[in-house]
Image (tube, rainbow, N blue to C red):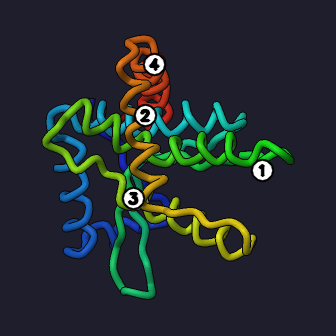
Amino acid sequence: MAPTINTDGISDQEKAAAKFQFVYQGMMAQLSRPRFIPILCAHEAAHLVYFTMAGLKEYDPHPASIRYDPTIDDYVGDLAGVKLLDLPPWVEGKFWEWFGLVAKAHAAGGVVARKLDPSTDGGDEDDRRRFKDLCDHLNGETPKLLINFEEVWKRAQDSVLEDLSQPEMMRIIEEHALVLRREFGL
């Protein structure tokens, strides 16, 4: 079965344009690479498993899509992913416990992707940026809080890798990946 790429909002005439075709063919080539889809789904499932540990109950799966971005006058492809809908804030007195799980949740996708395919970069550049933004926000919001992003990121990656040494954890992630694959239309 060929992967599905959501192109809602793009007319047939626009789809015939060279700019659109370039992005579409590039995404399709990426999604068609051997083992790419299972690794992508495992990456997203790893995020979900750890965010669920931090209290997440609902998420919104987003299939691979192409959209027009008028600010750059070009089409942009987004791989399948999940949007967190209800991650609760920390409970008073349990910040570090919550924060540790959130750190692992951000790092987990890349760690799992590299475990499944050591030749990949893990696809976690955006995850890393989002977590750094969170750390910067928390550091700015609370003057007494000094989070060393690099240190916490590395510790979270190491902790996830240690968790993955338990076959049960990888099995849970792989089960979630199969569910996500269907939800993504892949």
Judging by the rendered image, the residue that carries numbered circle 2 is 160
What residue is rendered at 38% in x and 12% in y? 167
Q: As shown in the figure, which amino acid type bears the numbered disc 1? A: Pro
Judging by the rendered image, the residue that carries numbered circle 1 is 89
Give the vertical position of 174 relative to 52 (above or below): above
Q: As shown in the figure, which amino acid type bears the numbered disc 4? A: Met
Closer to the eye: label 3 or 2: 2
Q: As shown in the figure, which amino acid type bears the numbered disc 2? A: Val
Judging by the rendered image, the residue that carries numbered circle 4 is 169
Image x and y of residue 176, in percent: 49, 24
Q: Measure the C-alpha gap from mark 1 to mark 2.
A: 21 Å
Q: Nearer the viewer, residue 173 or 25?
A: 173
Residue 69: which quarter of the image? bottom left
What residue is rendered at 60% in x and 40% in y? 101
Q: Measure the C-alpha gap from mark 3 to mark 4.
A: 28 Å
Q: As shown in the figure, which amino acid type bears the numbered disc 3? A: Asp
Task: Verify CB contact (< 8 Å) between mark 3 and mark 4.
Answer: no
Judging by the rendered image, the residue that carries numbered circle 3 is 78
Q: Nearer the viewer, residue 78 or 137?
A: 137
| Marked residue nearer the N-terminal end (3 or 2) | 3
Closer to the eye: label 3 or 4: 4
Q: Measure the C-alpha gap from mark 1 to mark 3.
A: 28 Å
| Marked residue nearer the N-terminal end (2 or 4) | 2
| Marked residue nearer the N-terminal end (1 or 2) | 1
Image x and y of residue 37, in percent: 29, 36
